[in-house]
Amino acid sequence: MNWIVQHLWLIPALPLLAAGLTALAKQRHRKFAASLSIGSMIGSLILSCLAFKDALQHSGAGEVSRQYLNFKWFQFGDQWLKLGWVLDPLTAVMLAMVCFVGLLIFIYSVGYMSHDENFTRFFCFLSLFAAAMLGVVIANNLLLLFICWELVGLTSYLLIGFWYHKPSAAAAAKKAFITTRVGDLAFLLGIAWLYSQAGTLTFYDHGQGCLEKDGITKLVAQATAGGMAVSTGIALLIFCGAIGKSGQMPLHVWLPDAMEGPAPVSALIHAATMVAAGVFLVARVYPLMSGSPGGIPSGTAALQVVTWVGAITAVFAATIAVAQTDIKRILAYSTVSQLGFMMLGLGVGGIAVGMFHLITHAFFKALLFMGAGSVIHGCHDEQDIRRMGGLRKFMPLTFATYAVGMMALSGVPILFSGFWSKDEILHSAHAWKISHWPFYLAVFGALLTAFYMTRQVLLVFFGDYRIALGRITRTEQYSLEHAGVPAEEHPQSELAGAPHESPPSMTGPLVVLAVCSVILGFIGTPLWPWFQSFLTGEHLRFDGHALAKPDVLFTMILSVVVVTIGVGLGYWLYGRKPVATAEEADVLEAIQPEVFTLLRRKYYFDEAYDWAFVGLNRWWAKACDWLDSWVWNGLVQLCAYVVVGISWVNRVIDEYVVNLSFDEVCRRVAGGGNLLSRLQDGRVQRYLRIIGIALTGLVLVLIWGCRS
Amino acid sequence: MTPLSGYLILSAMLFAIGLAGALIRRNAIMVLVGIEVMLNAANLNFIAFWRYGHNPQALTGVMFVIFSIAVAAAEAAVGLALIISIYRHYKTTDVEKINSMKG
């Protein structure tokens, strides 16, 4: 076992250390926090590259290479709980992606958060997130994965609510936390079930692990209620966790609201890495999902569920994205939709198909979010696309990179990575034997994706700026200077509210990501499917005729047509006649107001949840309140009255029986004492008088006695 | 009427006068004077019974009375000292007002 496998734990440990040190730093230690976090990410990236290189060396030869290290954590009963980490192509790819995108977003954050006074705290959270996410990726144990998974959820909560003084951000953070908990509860149940059935939570452990041949065979052979295999039940429960984390139907509601966080958070957590953790989880437990140790896609019930959930989410979220006006919300629904595509890819095509889209999507979606962040930053925290327009003149670099991201997401042919990864999914869906509907849904989703991205780009970057420009105010001048933008780069800066290009620390990462969004596609084309063979361990060969195969050609042509229609439709509706004012109704709204409102209100999902779950909860709380105030309170009151009555009787007995007689006795004794004390009042003469009278009396008696 | 009876009557009168003084007077000194008178009435009885008794040659009665007078003198000295001390404390010699042992 070589050095990197033994020291794989260093990759999450470095950002964790950085987070711990940053947590101790004071608010003003901004440079310290930023450089420590970025430095730790660079360290992790270097180690990840070493790990990637190692995985590359071991790959090939027709089998997935897997190196792992397990250690004993603690003992309970006669069993040892083992933790450990694994290095296989899946881990290596994810490690490299998370570290690389994470590093770029860290650098970007330095520029984006430069005005924020809690800069240090932000980097502390970011580092903690990176540590937790890398922990999820390397875990060789479902329990360790779950621990890191929950840490990721926690940091997501902290970062969405980073601007906690905004009520909407605080609410969004709570919503995200609670909604994902619903999925995680099922996930935890799945873990418990898996442990009770397989006796271990370790994935790979020299033939003893739950994802290896013996474990899977045992789980598949057992049947539970309704004739379902135990593996299916466990897989579905674990998939619930993935649904929550990856924002799939019906737990997608938190992801668009999570855009209340700062833009780098949206890019890092809610586009590139954390939401992909659900997809990664499904890929990680793929043997369990497919019921075969090799992880070959098959039509098991669990995979069918994954496929359908993915396909429905892909179209559903894409339709909502069409009608949104907040630049980040459009991207958020787009993310939900793309995550649906990934799930669909996992369901129909196996690990490689889903993961390929995950990796390419991570790059171009991070690019789009950071581009959106740059736009928001440049437009003075304006997020409504109706109040933008013509920005390509003000921020050319952002526009160029954003356009690359948009084309990658839409799947513009040949040059952009999104085309190849989406094509792969469509191809697999087309070949799926069970049903053709997921394929149709995916095609429709791809069409909508191209359409809404065209709409967004046209509204944001083309036409004219739709806010009247005036004189610049002092505070804006201040913020411009503090953004690190020299005045001469701002020809319009003397005009109030004029958008400005972002500082180099923000545009630099955009350029890098844009380059990656283009070149990444070429590692997974049908001609030279390096990525797929790396993940599945198949033999890699250059196949010049792959593109000419009828089914490959069919889907490629189809996706080209679909993208063309989508972009064309978008241009036809929004590009021919640019929207002139911010108040103008949307073109689609003019055509179909009812449908448009339905989409804009997100199919009333929030309202439905509000009515069903929140309302139920509220009703239940009211019922409990009623029960409490009338039944339980009544009982308590009754008890209280009984006690009061008893004590009243007690008091009466005490006062009128015990006290009275006692007092009477006392009074008599005191009276007697009083009476007797008069005899001894200290007047000596009175004593003498009594003695004298007594003596006289005695003498008289004696005399009387002597006589008789 | 024998001479003894005369002495005894005198003695009884003295005793009665002393008793009345001790019982009636409010001044502590006068009370003390009354007590002295009663004491001397008793002494007179001693002398009378000795002089007119069976054996007047033995000086028993006189000796007894001399002792009694000495004791009375000592008693008067202690009593006056007590009265002075009480007077210093209470600023009065009225026995009606002196009715507690504790000052």
Image: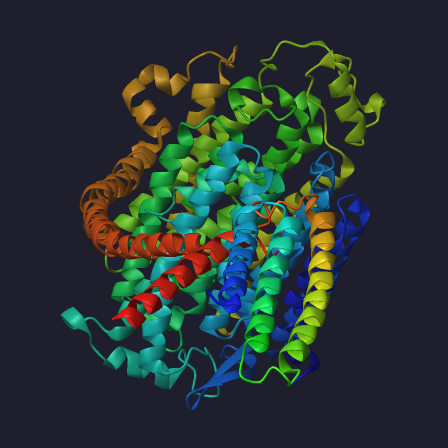
Q: Residue furthest left?
A: A226
Q: Nearer the viewer, residue A186 or A335?
A: A186
Q: Nearer the viewer, residue A497 or A366?
A: A497
- The quadrant of the image that shows the C terminus of chain A is bottom left
- Residue A22 visible, this orientation: no
x and y, in percent, of residue A652 in the image: 21, 49
Quadrant in which residue A564 is drawn: top left
Q: Nearer the viewer, residue A585 or A195?
A: A195
Q: Residue furthest front?
A: B1
A403 sits left or right of A303 in the view: right
- Residue A564 visible, this orientation: yes
At x 57%, y 71%, the residue is B48
A349 sits left or right of A158 in the view: left
- The quadrant of the image that shows the N terminus of chain A is bottom right
Instruction: Tell me if residue A630 comes above or below residue A523 in the rendering.
Output: above
Quadrant in which residue A184 is drawn: bottom left
Instruction: Tell me if residue A502 comes above or below residue A120 in the rendering.
Output: above
